[in-house]
Amino acid sequence: MHNEFDIRSVPGLHALTGEPVNGKWLLHVQDLAAVDRGRLTGWSLNISGQMDASILIEESPGVIIPDNVQRGIERVLMVSDTGHIDNIVVELDITHTYIGDLVVELISPDNTLVLLHNRSGGSANNIIKTYTMMNTSNLQNFRGDSVNGRWRLKVSDHAGRDQGKLNRWALAIEQK
């Protein structure tokens, strides 16, 4: 038997609209009846739509954020694409036992600075967060900037007694 499924026959597929197509796709097939059995002899996936004009860059440096050092650390990710920013998403994974000590800034190649975290959160542990233009309105300041060049992340600790670590940071940039 040969079946084809599309958005019209399986409306739940609409949930995949806008998702990236790169990566591993998994098909899960399960026979819930005990009377008979079957065999999957093959399957294919046909994806149509617009080409993805996004850039994903990331780094997992595992760099220590020195305790009570105002200049902190600076990391750089390079983008060689040309174009201008329409949307940006920033992912952070920072281990720290008192996030109220931390200041986190992102600087575009055009030297636009956006403050992502400014000593908030008190004694909470770790910043594992995704910043979007919806939940961090200052990211709107990057709209129209060039994507090309050095993207800098600055992380600094402004109080004593504990240090942290920048485990990972990533940028997902959609161009216009």
Image: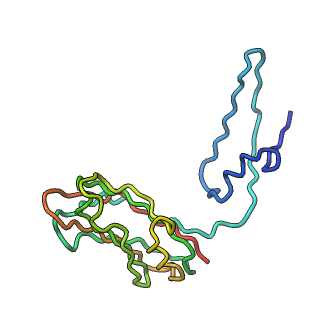
Figure colour scheme? rainbow
Residue drawn at point x = 38 percent, y = 79 percent = 113
Count every numbered label the image shows and give the total.
Answer: 0
Task: Say which quadrant the C terminus sits in.
Answer: bottom right
Residue drawn at point x = 45 percent, y = 64 percent = 131
Residue drawn at point x = 29 percent, y = 63 percent = 120
Judged left or right of residue 175, residue 117 is: left
Residue 8: x and y in percent read 82, 49
Residue farthest along the right direction in this orientation: 1
Residue farthest along the left direction in this orientation: 161
Residue farthest along the bottom direction in this orientation: 110
Residue 11: x and y in percent read 76, 47
Residue 57 in view (yes/no) = no
Residue 118 placement: quadrant: bottom left
Q: Nearer the viewer, residue 24 or 162?
A: 162
Residue drawn at point x = 72 percent, y = 46 percent = 12
Q: Nearer the viewer, residue 45 or 100?
A: 100
Task: Say which quadrant the N terminus sits in.
Answer: top right
Residue 89: x and y in percent read 49, 66
Residue farthest along the top direction in this orientation: 35
**Residue 18 vertical placement versus 45 (above, below):** below
Residue 15 in view (yes/no) = yes
Residue 100: x and y in percent read 25, 61
Judged left or right of residue 23, residue 137 is: left
**Residue 87 vertical placement versus 3 (above, below):** below
Residue 112 placement: quadrant: bottom left
Judged left or right of residue 57, residue 12 is: right
